[in-house]
Amino acid sequence: MAEEKKTSKKVEKADKSKDKKKKSKKNPFKSIASFFKSVKAEGKKVVWANGAYVLKNTLIVLVVVTIVGLAIYGVDTVLSLGMKGIKSLAETTTTTSVSQQVEDSTADTQEKTTETTSTKAAE
């Protein structure tokens, strides 16, 4: 008797697993519909904020964003002016040093020319 019950249970389990495989092939539209039904049910559980609370928080966000934007603009402006100042200083220094080098080389050339003509005249 005990053996018959075990074998009959095994047969029943096998039949149930076959039925489950057949049931697993669901209609995709039913799955989608059940998904949206559950979304709607969860949406009903949500506690929504009242209008005054939302308006207050929106204004706070806008004020903070404006302040941060102005701070970033100020830092950017100061850094831009600093970079322009450094660039103009570098150009002035480079121009001055180049003009000094040109004047030095011109003076050296004139001295050499004067020496050469003096030497030729002395001969």
Image (tube, helix red, strand yellow):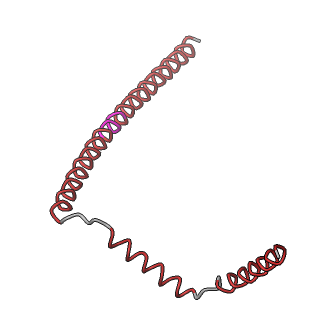
Q: How many marks?
A: 0
Q: What residue do we see at 32% from left, 41% from top?
A: 80
Which residue is more in the foreground, 10 or 75? 10
Q: Position of residue 67 (x, y in %)?
A: 22, 47
Is 65 above or below relative to 108? below
Q: What residue do we see at 68% from left, 86% from top?
A: 22
Q: Position of residue 93 (x, y in %)?
A: 38, 28
Q: Most extreme residue toward the top, as rendered?
A: 122
Q: Position of residue 34 (x, y in %)?
A: 48, 81
Q: Quadrant of the N terminus?
A: bottom right
Q: Most extreme residue toward the front, as rendered?
A: 1
Q: What residue do we see at 35% from left, 37% from top?
A: 83
**Horizontal side of residue 87 vs 5, given as left or right:** left
Is 20 above or below relative to 86? below
Q: Most extreme residue toward the left, as rendered?
A: 52
For residue 54: magenta?
Answer: no
The secondary structure that dominates the magenta segment is helix
Q: Quadrant of the C terminus?
A: top right
Q: Position of residue 90 (x, y in %)?
A: 39, 32
For residue 83: magenta?
Answer: yes
> Hey, which quadrant is residue 26 in on the image?
bottom right
What span is in magenta? 81-86
Which residue is more in the foreground, 116 or 40? 40
Which residue is more in the foreground, 93 or 40? 40
